[in-house]
Amino acid sequence: FVIHKELLYLRDSMGHERLCVPDTTSRDGARSNPRLRLIKEIHSNTMAIHLGIHRTTKELAKRAYWPGLAQDVKAYISTCEPCQRNKSSTHKPMGKAMPLQQPMRPGTHYSIDFLTGFPRSGRQEHDAIMVVVDRYSKKLRAIPTWKKADAKLTAELFLNHVCWGPDGNGVPIEIVSDRDVKFTPGNAKAKNQGFWKDFFGHIGTSIVLSTARHQRTDGQTERAIRHLTEVLRFGIDYE
């Protein structure tokens, strides 16, 4: 420990100094406690958009120190009203699932899903987002589209923004998606497999559809959609 300008700092083995923050709850009350004020500043500031427990603890530990810091962060975030209202709850997977093909490099395996329910916006009046995730690099692409876009338009958007874009990697090996009407035949008795499968099958891409009511097949994209939804909820005010 070192004292500098009447403030106590903890110096670690690397020479980095962190401010030691006292607990003044009994004297000044919980709202004036500098520990809670620091947690709030790191967790709830506009740029951070309500970090999780581990990220908040990591960022706070770079700057400050007190016994039980991690426990205080966890207690604060567990009672944060915007987090409880906007963030999705997670739980352990139920049972075992068959693994998907493991990609060996970026640009070969993608997962795709749609985020809908938006008011029309922009000159082209987009009302949905096509979310595409590279299963190797975890890179997320949010492509504006329309809820009523058919398989042909969706395939065109995928080719223009993913395959042929500035950072495109060509035609993919595999695309994972749910059983949206865009990806399945319009009629259960149809002889063909629908435009989506027929088109990508022709250019050599394998189409993998998730099992009904088993969203974890495309869980990576579902998680990306949850993250994108949380960011939009914190960052957009419809009023």
Image (cartoon, helix red, strand yellow):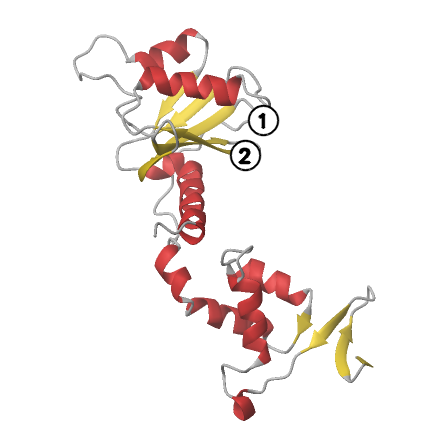
Q: Is residue 183 above or below residue 42?
A: above
- Under mark 2, the amino acid is Lys
User: On residue 96, which mark appears?
Assistant: none
- x then y, percent, for residue 57: 59, 64
Name of the residue lying farthest toward the bottom: 27
> Residue 139 bears which disc, if any?
2
Query: Marks 1 and 2: CB-CB under 8 Å?
Result: yes
Q: Is residue 204 left or right of residue 15?
A: left
Please give the residue where the numbered disc 1 appears in the rendered image.
106
Mark whose residue sits in front, 1 or 2:
2
Q: Nearer the viewer, residue 187 or 150?
A: 150
When asked about the image quadrant of residue 177, the answer is top left
Residue 138: x and y, percent?
A: 54, 36
Residue 35 image point, x, y percent: 58, 77
> Mark 2, residues whose alpha carbon is within 10 Å: few (<14), some, or many (≥20)?
few
Percent x, y for residue 186?
21, 17
Residue at image x 53%, y 87%? 25
| Type of the residue with mark 1 | Pro
Image quadrant where residue 146 sits: top left
Left or right of 187 in this view: 153: right
Depth check: 35 or 110 in front? 35
User: In the image, is 111 to the left or to the right of 118?
Assistant: right
Q: CA distance from mark 1 to mark 2?
A: 9 Å
Q: Of the residues under marks 1 and 2, which one precedes in the sequence?
A: 1
Whether residue 116 is visible to the viewer of this picture, yes or no, is no
